[in-house]
Amino acid sequence: MENQYDVIIVGAGPAGLNCALYTSRAGLKTLIIEKNIAGGKINLTSTVENYLGIKKIDGYELAENLYNHAIEYGAEYKNGSVETINNISEYENEVILTSGTIFKGKTVVIAAGMVNRYPTGVENFEKFLKQGVSFCGVCDGPLFRNKDIIVYGGGNSAVEEALFLSQYANSIKLVVKDEEFIADKISVEEIYKNPKIEVLKSHTLKSLDGDSNLKEIELINNKNNDIIKLNADGLFPMIGFIPAKEIYKNLDISDKSGFIITDEKMETKVKSIYAIGDIRVKNVRQIVTASSDGAIAAKEIWNALK
């Protein structure tokens, strides 16, 4: 059957692509489905410096390398948005796209990753999505050349975003909700060395204002509840990610937060359905750990189907 596969991988980040590399090399008929572009969140990273063997590489370049390697041994790649995944019986599964297309797989590997977390309780936030609010400095940074930007968050994503955007912006205010950063020390040191970046700690985003585009934001001082207003042409909220759980909510395989529970072989409680990468319950979410998950799942699938 044309739409019948040994392995269907949902998501083309490092986990999914590495899994596809291993399964296709093993001779298993493999399909990768991705709704955006191959490489996942790596494409949104300006520079990768913590992948062993590659001292420094642009995120989009690494993503392209991973994709080209993954399809080299015959894995098929399709752009499409998955609506749901159905388990019919053991080693009989359906992956249904929003277009209505149905693919059948003996096994399904969920590698859909995570999506940006929206700040809650912020007045007018959704009104200014794509009208000043962006989640991707690599994509939209040039649009904010010589503009005043707010980056909201205190982790590595926020710090890296602020540093990257400083090449374009007139000024950047890095707003941190807590009293201290949770980002890597070496990255935080770079923030304080950058003359374009000002840090505001212990402040929470309250509201956005403007006409057709963002012009101003309000912050609350968490220590004394004072409200301050800042001019802002752009806002980049970098407060973490949540799992892309809609596609598997019918399978009852996740914890209360939506992350998928697997065993050490990457298999869920539903036989023949696996989960790998950032979307599963785990302590460390890095390119190297995602890639490892993909290799482990591929080995177990090969053992199950051979």
Image (cartoon, grey):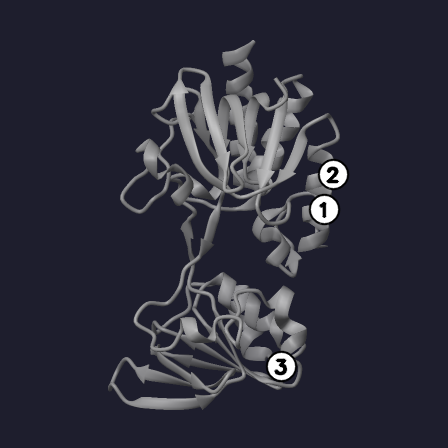
* Element marked by disc 3: loop
- Residue at 70 percent across and 48 percent down: it is 62
Q: Which residue is mark 1?
A: 64
Between residues 284 and 138, which one lies in front from this camera angle?
A: 138
Q: Quadrant of the N terminus?
A: top right
- Whether residue 275 is visible, yes or no, is yes
Q: Which mark is residue 215?
A: none
Q: Which quadrant of the figure has residue 176? A: bottom left
Residue 27 location (% of width, % of height): 67, 16
Residue neighbourhood size for the residue with mark 2, other residues' Cα within 10 Å, grouped as few (<14), some (14–19), many (≥20): some
Q: Which residue is mark 3?
A: 169
Q: Residue 86, relative to residue 299: is it above or below?
A: below
Which residue type does callout 2 highlight?
Asn
Q: Judge left or right: residue 147 versus residue 56.
A: left
Q: Are marks 1 and 2 in contact (CB under 8 Å)?
A: yes
* Element marked by disc 1: helix
- Residue at 72 percent across and 46 percent down: it is 64
